[in-house]
Amino acid sequence: MEIPQIKRAYLPKELTLETFEDILPYFKELQERNIDTPQAFQKWIQDGSELDAFLEENGAWRYIKMSIDTTKPELTESYTYFVSEIQPKLAPLLNELNKKMMASPFQKDLSEDPAYAIFFRSVGVQLALFREENIPIEAYLGEKSQEFGSISAAQTIEYEGKTLTMQQASVHLKNQDEGIRKQVYEKMAERRQMDIDSLNALYTDLIAKRHELAINAGFENFRDYMFQSMGRFDYTKEACFDFHEAVAQKVVPLVKEIQEMKLQKLGKSAFKPWDLDVDPDGNEPLKPFQNGEEMLEKTIEIFQRMDPYFSACLRTMKTMGHLDLDSKAGKAPGGYNYPLYEIGVPFIFMNAVGLHRDLVTMVHEGGHAIHSFLNRELTLTAFKNIPSEAAELASMSMELLSMKYWETFYSDPKALLRAKVEHLEDILKVLPWIAQIDAFQHWVYTHPTHSLTERSNEWLSLSKRFGTGLTDWTGYEALQAHSWQRQLHLFEVPFYYIEYGIAQLGAIGVWKNSLENESLAIEQYKAGLSLGYTRSLPKIYETAGVTFDFSPKRIGELMDFVDSYTKSLT
């Protein structure tokens, strides 16, 4: 795929960002510019969008480089400088530009375009939420939340003379030798226990600051503030509560059935924490590739078979060096696809160690990447800034759509069948975790002055509601009470999690469509993603061939489908 050179229509092509003063003149010019025609108004918006893309991409590269190597202070300092020195100074300038935009007599006519109507709606929310006193708080939160990555990246264990990251160590939790699993788990547990207090203190600090920010903006709590800030226009907190209850009623029993069968095969009455990932049939862990390079090449092959456009996207990223795939010491945990709005070619970051879950992560992030490519020609940066519910539809659908072609990774039919069954069972198992994390956040931010004991008790209560009760945590009670600390989203992107559940339901619908007519399903999938954020979430889902529906009835129907399909494979 040929990517055209960046052509800036407003900013000088040689512009770089070293200090705030480098970009201040462009904000001043936009603020002072006379807008006397509809065409001038639209050009003014496009110039502001170009400035926005430049800033977004500059911050993105600082974050990417920092997360690839957290051991280099200069990379952390570069990102910290952006969020503490540049972003706070941008906030009042962006607010003034938003005021000018919404006060324009030409704004009303442009709102007749549904894409601009959605854009102006989001700008209106930004204006309503802006408070001068929140600027330093937001800067503090942007910097402080990144401490989670540094703390987690430093978590390693020594095993068989090697230093292993937690991702690398977790491979041994699939070993058939229970003695090895127990030994490695205890090493991991001991290391995680060292950070329980520091992560509790970090989270307590973040909660207090986020609550203060919400109060300043006129809200009772941070939860209600975030529903506005995240632009959740198409559903309510009550719909989230319904989702929680539906998962507890419809999904947890299916997960319990899966786990009871596993226990029976293991000859145990209850799991120990080191038993949860082992194959009950005595199989060694699925290892679909040896390294990140092999994983990438085989993913490109799969994408080529699905749709040549998909593979072209990954090839372009490879050529441009926009991938960092293997786990290594000092690398931040997790995985992401980071959109780069100016150049239009995203970056995939992950921690592959050769396991099946890494294959799933690769195609997941590949789905995000394709979404970025399909949006790159949209005229405004805001049109490419996708709500999570739509963004995760892209990635989770790709997981399931790609499943048909996993023989590229698994030449053994038995291993292929096992990979598919494991993935479908994982979909069932992850939904209760999604509901639990979301329910936990609702409680945390509506009880902002809670004690550490109350926090642990609430988490344990939710664990009973969304868990199966089949794991014996005796001797590891503290780790169970603090298992939420492993979830990056709680620290870095609060309230971003239920979107995975909503999108998973949509993705099952896309996959179900593909089993009936694959070419049509992929065509609809691409059409939905190509909309970016120029239509409402229900319209995006409809264009993708599914409904934006996470009601108990819909959840029940889809879970029955996944359950019956999985059982048909075994």
Image (spheres, grey):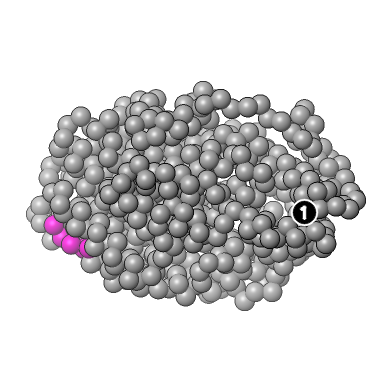
- Percent position of residue 323, x then y: 49, 31
Magenta residues (range): 254-261
Left or right position of 133 against 114: right
Task: Using the rendered image of the protein, determine whether residue 427 is visible from the camera's viewpoint.
Answer: yes
x and y percentages locating residue 335 in the rendered image: 46, 42
Front residue (pair 407, 490): 407
User: Against 198, is 66 above or below?
Assistant: above
Q: Secondary structure at mark 1?
A: helix
Which residue does the image show at 45% across and 70% down from the upper left? 240
Q: Closer to the camera, 374 or 365? A: 374
Is 257 magenta? The answer is yes
Can residue 353 be seen?
A: no
Q: Main secondary structure of the magenta part?
A: helix
Which of the 4 image quarters holds residue 297? top left
Q: Residue at x 29, y 72 (%)?
A: 249
Q: Residues within 10 Å of mark 1 (few under 14, many from 20)?
A: some
In front: 122, or 431?
122
Residue drawn where x is 53% and y is 74% of the image: 446
x, y (%) of residue 13?
76, 29
Is residue 124 found inside the magenta-colored segment of the image? no
Q: Amino acid at mark 1?
A: Leu
Residue pictured at 51% horizontal, 29% vertical: 317
Residue tagged 1: 94
